[in-house]
Amino acid sequence: MDVPGFPADGTATVLLDGRRTVSWWSRAAADLFGRTADEVLGRPVAEALGAPLPPGTARVEGAELHRADGTRFTADLTLLPTAGAQDTAAGAEDPAVGAQNTTVGAEDTADRRSATGSALLVVEPHPTGPGRADDVLLARALLQQDRLAVAHLGPDLELLRTNPAFEVLRLSGLAAPGEGPQWLERLRTPDDASSAREAVALVAARGDGVIGAEYRLTEPLAPAPASGPRPRTATHRVFSLTGFRATDPAGAPAGVVLVLVELPGRDGGRLQLAEAYRRAAEIGASLDVVGGARELVDILVPALGDLAAVDFPDAVLQGRDPQLGYPGPEASAPRRVAAKAAVGRWPTALVQVGELTPTPAATPETAAIAVGGAILFDPATALLAMGDQPELAIRHIPAGLRSAIGCPLYHRGRLFGYVQVWRTGDAEPHDQEDLRVVQDLCDRTALALDNSFRYTREHRTAVVLQRSLLPPAATASTACETAGSYRPASGAVSVGGDWYDAFPLSSLRVALVVGDVVGHGLQATATMARLRTAVQTLAELDLPPDELLIRLNDLVQRMAAEADEPDTVGASCLFAVYDPVTGTCELASAGHPPPLLLTPDGRAEVLAVPPGPLLGAADQPFEPTRTVLPAGSLLALYTDGLTAHDPDTALPRLLTELTRRHDPDRPLADIGAHLIATVPAEHPDDDIALLLARTRTVPPDSTAGWRYTDLSEVSRARADTAARLAAWGLDHLAFAVELIVSELVTNAIRHAGGPAELRLIRDRILVCEVSDPSNTQPRLRRALETDEGGRGLFLIAQLSDRWGCRYAARGKTIWAEFAVEPEL
């Protein structure tokens, strides 16, 4: 059935034919009247409703109807014409209209057989039973209240009407009928963070009511009188605001109704004091001493005075603890660090922010003021404290002084500064309660300053220790050029355990490391130092990256077992080894963010390195990743502070910046500084460690390799070595290198049972490598005079500058390094 306004939400509806008899009865109507469809179908509507329906009336408001049990209720009746509409009314034998009907509204009409109806009756019962006359009485009583200011606002928050209480409560000057919502801006929350307009707009938009919200009305200064002083502070009144959305008879929004009640005894001063105490708990949260002073004057003005200022000695401003006890007359003048005026600008005659604060000559009274508690001054006492120095009085005492409070910022025997609060004009002078409040606020501020200094000392110590444990910021080797950057956390967060490292390995390879220790402070820094040392030690064993992380994981688990709080020991780590001969880079990660790669052709990507578990979290293997890096590739290893713990957003940005800023001739330190600068510096909650590496490769003509399978080829290995050294101009190394090659190739074929692969690499050093398929660990030992063997490794150790052994997936490589003279 297509009927405008047809209810589909369970509203009681009745379909009437041309004779005003019931042709369909919804289940909601059966529930409302207590009569089933069988009882009313075909009967006059008056009998079904228990009251007559006036003829020709489209809507009847407040009709009194009767239920089957005799109870009465009030409802609004609406008649909707349905001429020509097709409905599906039927007899009681049709389940869709009988007592068994289980659907209502539009669904009731979906499958019925067609029947012609003339009208649809919608019954809207009043929720509480009283009629519209009672509603009018209630509204009239509300509007006639002389202590309840009632305002009706339209959908756009324009003022439609007010009651007489607006005049009684002196609110009529706020707005006049027809004015927009701007007047609501003058009703502010106690902390001045928002206005009533914002809350009322939400009521109009969402229908959520506001109940008993407190708002402050600041009234402007009165005009200056013809004679006598003018008040310098505005007056404040506090109101409780209740608001709810109004609706029209059809339920559509029709604006907002506001009820304002002035709260007696809740004067603005007391409200401001309560707000001052609430905000005092936040003093020093930034751990910035000057910021704490500014927070204090913001609290003091206007809650406790018209003017307030804070002075600090130089020691505090320089980040040093002030000395114990009274600083004495020889102490330098303090400096004004914060000042605020309730009205207008800070008076020019007074000491300005940044200027030194002149002090009167030292006397026992001034010493008592400096180290004692809060002191209340009247104008005469204030002048006396200046010690008959008029020039000081001008700089310290504002015009029209009414009273003042001075209080030192004193904690643990140290004077951190001095606070002054002034009231001027006709304002009420300070009393003992104000004195107690100022003392309390200053004590809290002094404690916050002391905490700031304690944090600053620990933070500075941790940063110095952290930086001393990190490697040089820039390194250069055959394998790559590197640059490291580190930025400690600031604000309320102490320095963390982020670190980076780059150090050489055998055969011109380089190790690149970045890690992040769980937690902050000195403990995290100490853990970082242990892990960095462990990584370097394990790397000297030439372990593959995945095996190195397994050994490091064992160490972290032992450290956690020894710690008082095991959950505080843990770390993430990314370890990479780059070989400039082959251009391969092998990486493994322990729960660390993946590195970024920029190739010389401009391709930027995030390397897909399986993260693995955090160090100390589980006994699980780590998966290695191998990739080939062209010469000139830029690799970026970092900690999660660089992504602000949001990699999905940060990584695309970092790749873009890396591509835009990269230039082969640009120093890596500049690129690293720019990447770190992209992270907001306002109190970052984590350290940032960044290691950039620009790869290099060894020229092909600087390497040579051979393969030997039989002992008879040992002499050819010596000859190949001698010829290559001669071509490179390294004949002076021929004797030692030939002897080592002969020993290593012989042992590889005789004891390892397999082909021996010889490789020579020339750079700033000469590297000699012999690889075989055996995993047997070579061992240096002292051979007896009667032993026929066992002297090979001893000879290698004596003839080379450095030697060692590393293992691959299959087999091992024994290597030896020789220094090349600078002139060659």
Image: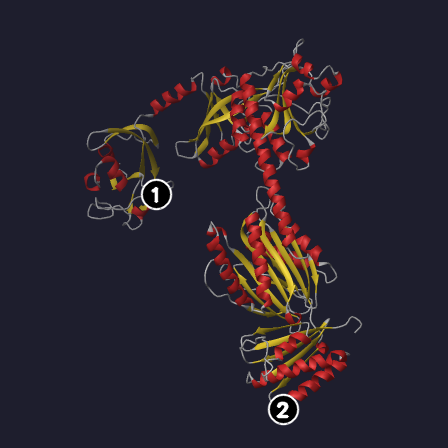
Identify the residue position indicated by label 2 in the image: 712
Residue type highlighted by circle 1? Ala
- Of 462 and 675, which appears nearest the observer? 462
Residue drawn at x 35%, y 33% is: 58
Q: Residues within 10 Å of mark 1 (few under 14, many from 20)?
A: few
Secondary-structure class at tag 1: loop
Q: Mark 2: which secondary structure?
A: helix
Mark 2 and mark 1 in contact (Cβ < 8 Å)?
no
Vertical position of residue 680 compared to residue 377: above or below: below
Q: Is residue 88 left or right of residue 547?
A: left
Position of residue 592 in the picture relative to residue 762 (left or right): left
As drawn, the residue found furthest toward the bottom would be: 712
Q: Residue furthest top?
A: 227
Q: Earlier in the sequence, mark 1 or mark 2?
A: 1
Q: Position of residue 409 (x, y in %)?
A: 61, 28
Give the answer, above or below, for where 190 lies relative to 698: above
The part of the image, by quadrant, that contains residue 324 is top right
Q: Which residue is mark 1?
A: 8
Label 2 environment density (alpha carbons within 10 Å; few <14, some 14–19, many ≥20): few
Against 322, residue 540 (above or below) is: below
Give the residue furthest to the right. Answer: 823
Residue 679 in the image: state x and y as whole percent. 62, 49
Q: Is any part of residue 606 visible from this angle?
A: no
Q: Hey, which residue is sitting farthest front in the picture?
A: 785
Q: Residue at 55% of width from left, 85% of height from top? A: 753
Q: Nearer the viewer, mark 1 or mark 2?
A: 2
Which quadrant does the C terminus fall into? bottom right
For marks 1 and 2, give the CA distance: 101 Å
